[in-house]
Image (spheres, rainbow, N blue to C red):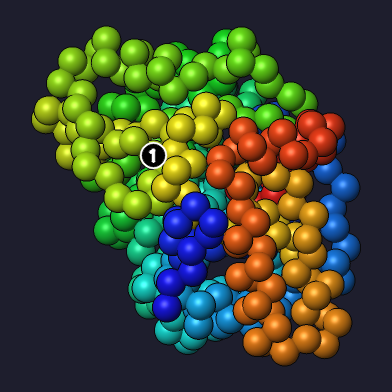
Amino acid sequence: MQIKDSFDRTIDYVRIGVTDRCNLRCFYCMPKEGIPYEPKADLLSYEEIIRLLDVLGNLGFRKVRFTGGEPFLRKNFITLLEKTHQLAHFKNIHITTNGTLMTQHITKLMELGINSLNLSLDTLDADRFKKITRRDDFKKVIQTFHTLIDEGFKLKVNAVVMKGINTQDILPLVALAKQHPVSIRFIEEMPFNGGYKENSTIFKATDIFKTIKKKHVSLSPKIGKHGDTSTNYSIDGFIGDVGIIPAFSRTFCDTCNRLRITPKGDIKTCLYDGGTYSIRDYIRSGVTNEQIASKFMELIKLKPKDGFVAEKGTNKSLIREESMSSIGG
């Protein structure tokens, strides 16, 4: 079974934020003092998440990514991973993490066949890491990076590129892919940080490309697949590759295949929409799985053509106030 939206895009990938809490304070994600966290009772329970995943799996969803905040901060997160694995719907279970809390769980992840992770790392400079994250955890994160590589994980490194902050880190991060089988992915900064970015303040995907191409003239695009947000490139002599995600420019929307569920159960069919439908309240009203499935199909049909259309239909003040930690990445 395949679920298609109104623009004939197959929707088969769900991203679920399991918590809005994070132990870092990256300034592009949340303010220094943090954000008002949702009470535990307002978050989707693990039982509710598994129920939603079972419904989505029966609708043809085959990929799930757990995000946060920092997902390993939520108590018994491994239990959720075990139950998701037992569903057998999902060929691909992925996690996005900041790498500060997960090394103790690596063996269990391998047992569950979860060998693909996204690691957030915006710089290889310890002082700049502390400035960006407001925490002194660089050594811990880089140790996690090397441990995951040594254990054979398929690893993607996500680096948010910010004008005047870490553009000097682009080439050092690219160099990681020369010696290691990793994908280094550079992401345009987005407005979900309690502030708002205009075009003039964004270091765009084209700027990132020019920076890499100037140093590595052999940079050449790789063949992508449906749903890719990243345009990936190979470089002669490199084991890994690099990618660029135009998250602000939004040039990948025509192949979008994803649905987002925030930690408190709001559905976002697009990162730039208001995300105002609460699937949490719906399932707590006593509905059947068949009714939940129908609701998902209804919401997917309302998925906007692209992020620009979604943004036009959303009060921009909502975007200005949202934190990526509360959205779920």
Give the camera-side residue of 274 and 245: 274
Residue 234 shown left or right of residue 186 in the figure: left
Q: Quadrant of residue 291?
A: bottom right
Q: Quadrant of residue 235?
A: top left
Residue 110 shown left or right of residue 220 in the figure: right
Residue 246 shown left or right of residue 209 in the figure: right
Residue 264 showing in the rendered view = no
- Residue depicted at x 62% and y 33%: 308
Give the camera-side residue of 233 and 131: 233
The amino acid type, in three-letter code, at marker 1 is Ser
Residue tagged 1:
230
- Residue depicted at x 27% and y 10%: 214
Image spot of residue 182 (x, y percent):
29, 43
Residue 269 showing in the rendered view = yes
Farthest residue in the left direction? 237
Position above or below: 42 against 308: below
Position above or below: 41 against 204: below
